[in-house]
Image (cartoon, rainbow, N blue to C red):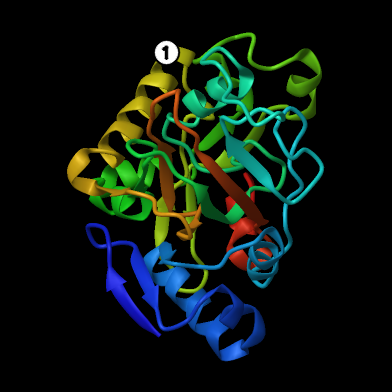
Amino acid sequence: MELIALGPDFGVEVRGIGLIDVTSSDIAYRATRAALDEHSILLFREQDVTDDVQAAFSRAFGPLERVKIGSVGVGTFYSRLNNIAADGSLVPPTHQQALTARANQLWHTDSSFKPTPALASVLSARIVPDDGGETEFTSTRQAWSRLPPPIQARLRDAVVSHAYANSRDQIDPGLMTPEERAAVPPVRWRMTWRNPVNGRTALYVASHAYAVEGMGDKEARALLAELIGDATRPEFTYRHRWRPGDVIMWDNRATMHRGLPWAHDQARSMVRTTISAVDADGLADLRPGA
């Protein structure tokens, strides 16, 4: 296995092994898991990826999430992120799928709004537009390391509330139905997530985060905006231009990401599988009061 650097001190392209190798070889799996813990983002190029192959690869790292209500692919392991209607036509900019893509253009980390957050996500490119539709990533581990020690001491055990509705309401308050809102009520997590393998700490904030215990609403939102803004300065990000067959796996404990827009008259189809965190991934320490 060869690792080629991608971003500014995070992220690597994995060469020499593919998704199927990881599912069939314990040695390949262990090497890939070690690379994820160390580099946070793994890129596999030119994969002959199918839903089954992607799920098998993802399941090697932990239990898979079921897609939540209100999303394309609900109840399955496959979140289908596209602008394609059931009849094959492209949806208009006001369609829910298009609005969801706009919401995904906010910096976020997957499933921070769920009772069990995500360890990692795996996203495969099935159809890519001629231009646009890239995905940007940043390391919240590096963002944490840049904070002065007094601020780290103040924020390390701060408790943050996350809600899916917080990010969706920034795009369109009507994007979620009352049933969808009830299915994902707010959750509380510490502001930092420590990786138990290497002891490194990362900020755990995103567009789903909206409140910090002990702070007023205005103060908390300003703090969260400042932290996200610093973490996502252009010099600290990696922008990935997708090719068909690309598969990227990222560590949700130590990164944020966002999609970029593309022309509405061009198709874009991506499939995401999401791996739930367990206590061995540091989840116990993330829980307030742990």
Task: State which quadrant residue 60 falls in.
Answer: bottom right
Left or right of 192, for residue 145 = left
Secondary structure category for the residue under label 1: helix
Q: Residue furthest left?
A: 235
* Crowd rating for badge 1 (residues with CA inside 10 Å; few <14, some 14–19, many 20+): few
x%, y% of residue 76? 79, 47
Q: Is residue 106 above or below residue 281?
A: above
Left or right of 279, for residue 223 = left
Left or right of 233, for residue 76 = right
User: Is residue 213 in sight in this rendering?
Assistant: no
x%, y% of residue 199? 44, 68
> Which sits in the foreground, 55 or 187?
55
Q: Who's the residue at 54% across and 37% down the image?
A: 159
x%, y% of residue 35? 43, 74
User: Is residue 20 in sight in this rendering?
Assistant: yes
Q: Who's the residue at 49% across and 83% down the image?
A: 31
**Residue under pointer 1:** 218
What is the number of callouts on the image?
1
Q: Residue furthest front?
A: 88
Q: Is residue 188 above or below residue 174?
A: below
Q: Who's the residue at 64% across and 63% down the image?
A: 54
Q: Is residue 285 above or below residue 93?
A: below
Kindly identify the amino acid type of the residue bearing the numbered disc 1.
Answer: Lys
> Which sits in the foreground, 201 or 66?
66
Q: In which quadrant of the rendered image does the N terminus lie?
A: bottom left
x%, y% of residue 79? 66, 43
Left or right of 139, for residue 87 = right
Task: State which quadrant residue 283 falls in.
Answer: bottom right
